[in-house]
Amino acid sequence: MKSEAPWLAQKAIVESDKATAAEINGSPKLQASGLDFFYGNNQALHGISLRIPALKTTAFIGPSGCGKSTFLRTFNRMNETLRHARMQGEVLLDGENILEMEVSQLRLRVGMVFQRSNPFPKSVFDNVAYGPRVNGTRRKSDLEEVVETSLQRAALWDEVKDHLHKSALELSGGQQQRLCIARAMAVDPEVLLLDEPCSALDPIATAKIEELLFQIRNSCTLVIVTHNMQQAARVADFTGFFLLGKLIEYDTTKTIFERPKIQATEDYITGRFG
Amino acid sequence: MRHFDQELEQLKVMLLEMASLVESAITNSVNSVVQKDKLLAESVLEKEATVNQMEVDIDDFAIKLLALQQPMAVDLRLIAAGLKINTDLERMGDLAVNIAERAIELYQEPVIKPMVDIPHIAALVQSMVQKALDSFVNKDVELAKSVLASDDAVDDLRTASFHELISYMERTKHNIPQAVSLLSIVRNLERIADHATNIAEDVIFYVKGIDVRHHAEVRE
């Protein structure tokens, strides 16, 4: 007698696809409404409105200079570090305007990982423990627990558990990036922003990062900017296509990559421009 | 034109070359029955190996495109539809061979009354095949839908032929072997029509990204 398990698993995948389509209209974790962004007199974003579902992975794709990284950085107000940058419109986290939050509290809830890994010039342990220490965790046992948990979540624990006091700068590029993810996860963020996290990594390291994103997706809302469309197709539940500072199309990843509704989206993802 | 676009065009050309052979096989197999032409029937059998090899070549080429190009959207749908159309064409070729084999069994037998319905059914089926393939070439969704709408007419003709042949067998028991061969021919023609509707469904998926299989309302 054939096992029913493979068919049930397939049915679950199909039902999951239907569920994700409904969530795009549900209660969002992050929401932008009529967002304009300016670098001085240069308008980088034009009227962006979208809803990012909770505990899902959303990817932004588009050609270089389209505004996807600028948009990503609005979610934790990183753009405020830039001179002459200003924003109009609204960005909400759980319905609360992020401009009305204390920025350090916002960045506890919305972590970020950058294109180039940026470990602190400290040990592996101290890199991961830094955030919890700053936020008041002092007991050694508590710090050890959060460091181990975070490194395990980042799929790095087995590789560094015997070298926790080694300098983080001695790790490989892929390990450093996973360390940065562990560091971000150590403060238990609700959202993790990833700005082209794999663009500086080899395919093996990239695969490990993508696998890591699969592992943490159920505990954290992920928003990822990538110029690798195949990566967006692999990891994201929802995908937004940006062009010249505008959001052209935003839908389930399945729809975007199988039958996009806008011709410009299809032209981009089929490589006919961009 | 990008190199990948050229390869997609090549895939279409390969499919259409195979389709041309299969259409000829269907036409020749039906003519060999009606005209009692044993040589024509044998020519259909001789070409079967060519059609089968084309199926293998097209599958190989399409899989290569999937692996090396990681196509998206309409390009992905074209290759996916192409793989399915490839299978349908090969099966249509097999069914034409079945008809030709029945023609060889029948060529020395006298014409019996139910045989006169064969050209009528065959004409409708061949029209469906041609329209399905034209809809693929021209990305014509309306033409593809018209193929789906024709399927019921073929089924009705098949049912009527079956009743007539069964009634004929009850009346003229010495012609049962011949009538059974005709039953088989009608059944094979009806199955060719089913494959033509499959191709039409694949065209709609390719052009619109909509899966219309098993959706009766599309045919209405």
Image: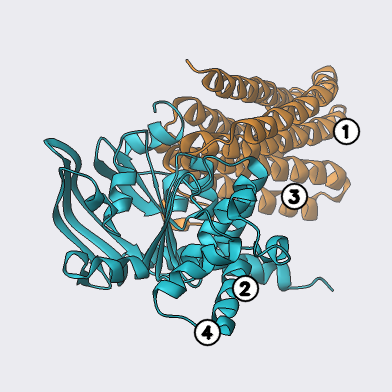
- Total count of labels: 4
Res. A209 in view: no
Q: Amino acid at mark 4?
A: Arg
Q: Are marks 1 and 2 on the same chain?
A: no
Read off the residue under disc 3. Answer: B168
Which of A73/B189 is in front?
A73
Q: Amino acid at mark 1?
A: Glu
Which of B46/A258 is in front?
A258
Q: Tell me which chain the residue with mark 1 is part of.
A: B
Read off the residue under disc 1. Answer: B105
Q: Which chain is cyan?
A: A
Closer to viewer: mark 2 or mark 4? 4
Q: Tell me which chain the residue with mark 4 is part of.
A: A
Q: Which of the labelled discs sits on residue A148, or is there none? A: 2
How many residues crowd around disc 4 within 10 Å: few (fewer than 14), some, or many (20 or more)?
few
Q: Residue at x 47, y 52 (%)?
A: A254
Q: Are marks 2 and 4 on the same chain?
A: yes
